[in-house]
Amino acid sequence: MRKGGILNAQLAGALARLGHTDLVVVCDCGLPVPDGPEVVDLAFRFGTLSFEEVLRGLLGELVVERATAALEVREANPGCYRLLKSELGGLDLIPHEQLKLLVREAKLVVRTGEARPYANVILRCGVPF
């Protein structure tokens, strides 16, 4: 049994397989996910697990060199926007329709139980050196 960190076996394995420049999507329960990326579904009920809980947990495990979110998050979900700005150094904002297209390029999608709009971010993996 692990002492801490990511306990979900599927998620821990998926994170271990990530490399530099790989894309990881952390999304709400409503984001359409195309075929292709590995999906780890952590949604249990609306709001559980929350986007914030999952994002903070992943940021404790990953080196992130850049992040992308939907432009619409600023107006539609200001709390999420503040979270993204405070937790991520570089945050690019693009239209939501464009963000959904980028999800196809992701290596991993982590679906949360978040039910507030535009609680989605694409993390670009960096390296610790």
Image (cartoon, rainbow, N blue to C red):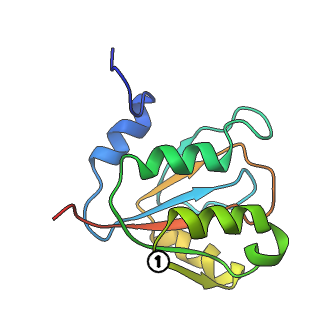
Indicate whether 86 appears above or below 14: below
Q: Is residue 2 above or below residue 31?
A: above
Q: Residue 38 at x, y = what percent?
A: 45, 51
Q: 60 or 42: nearer the eye?
A: 60
Residue shown at the point (28%, 45%) measured from the top left: 16
- Foreground of the two, 30 or 88: 88
Residue extending furthest top? 1
**Which residue in the rendered view is the most extreme toward the front?**
86
Q: Residue at x 33, y 20 (%)?
A: 2
Give x and y (percent) for residue 123. 46, 66
Q: Quadrant of residue 54?
A: top right
Residue 49 picture quarter: top right
Q: Residue at x 60, y 38 (%)?
A: 42
- Quarter of the image with the N terminus is top left
Counting from the top left corner in percent of width and height, residue 59 is at: 44, 52
Relative to 2, is 85 on the left or the right? right
Q: Please, what secondary structure does the residue beneath circle 1 have?
A: loop
22 or 33: nearer the eye?
A: 22
Which residue is denoted by mark 1 in the rendering?
90
